[in-house]
């Protein structure tokens, strides 16, 4: 879901007039910008909103830009991010790992799923040894 500048202003109990006053940019300029996509904003407008909100411009931009990420899991076809895993047990294991890490903020790509699948099917013995050294020899 895309966050809008109107929602951010509302959450901070601010109006366009408040931002205009704090930033020195005309209220009409800011009001017109709100009606347009952020991609059409000038740096001056972005900076004005950021200043009025007490934020850095890159942080505000990050909040306003849409995040098109979607975790795609298709249980019927046993697919994760478009990668089909024919073995049902392996699919369940990979899905469990992906979903749990996704809840922690990981946004796996198709390549990430391919890498994970490769590692599950053919583990790296050096990695296994490092894991044992780290976690089993305490």
Image (cartoon, helix red, strand yellow):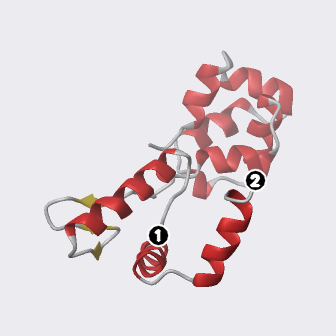
- Quadrant hosting residue 26: top right
- Residue at far left of view: 76
Q: Which of 20 and 1 is in front in this view?
A: 1
CA gap, disc 2 and disc 1 = 34 Å
Where residue 57 sits in the image (x, y, percent)?
Answer: 78, 47
Q: Tell me the residue at 77%/30% (across/down).
A: 53
Q: Tell me the residue at 65%/82% (across/down).
A: 126
Q: Tell me the residue at 49%/73% (across/down).
A: 112
Q: Nearer the viewer, mark 2 or mark 1?
A: 2
Few, some or many residues within 10 Å of mark 1 (<14, 14–19, 20+):
some
Where residue 75 sits in the image (x, y, percent)?
Answer: 19, 59
User: Which residue is label 2 attached to?
Assistant: 138
Q: Nearer the viewer, residue 115 or 111?
A: 115
Whether pointer 2 and pointer 1 mark residues with C-beta atoms closer than 8 Å, the reply is no
Where residue 101 sits in the image (x, y, percent)?
Answer: 51, 52
Q: Quadrant of the N terminus?
A: top left
Q: Earlier in the sequence, mark 2 or mark 1?
A: 1
Where residue 31 sits in the image (x, y, percent)?
Answer: 62, 34
Residue 48 lies, with reference to residue 131, above or below; the image says above
> In the displayed structure, does residue 119 sit left or right of residue 54?
left
What secondary structure is found at the residue carrying circle 1?
A: loop
Q: Which of 81 and 32 is in front in this view?
A: 81
User: Which residue is label 1 attached to?
Assistant: 109
Residue 43 lies, with reference to residue 94, above or below; the image says above
Residue 95: which disc? Answer: none
Count the marks: how many?
A: 2
Residue 43 lies, with reference to residue 90, above or below; the image says above
């Amino acid at each position: 879901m895309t966050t809008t500048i109107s929602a951010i202003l509302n959450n901070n109990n601010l109006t366009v007039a408040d931002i205009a006053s704090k930033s020195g940019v005309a209220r009409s300029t800011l009001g017109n910008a709100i009606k347009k996509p952020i991609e059409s904003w000038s740096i001056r407008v972005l900076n004005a909103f950021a200043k009025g909100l007490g934020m850095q411009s890159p942080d505000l931009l990050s909040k306003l830009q849409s995040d098109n990420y979607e975790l795609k899991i298709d249980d019927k076809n046993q697919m994760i991010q478009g990668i089909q895993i024919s073995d049902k047990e392996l699919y369940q294991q990979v899905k469990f790992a992906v979903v749990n890490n996704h809840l922690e903020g990981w946004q796996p790509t198709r390549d990430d799923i391919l890498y994970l699948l490769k590692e599950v099917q053919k583990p790296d013995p050096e990695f296994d040894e490092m894991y044992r050294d780290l976690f089993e020899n305490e």
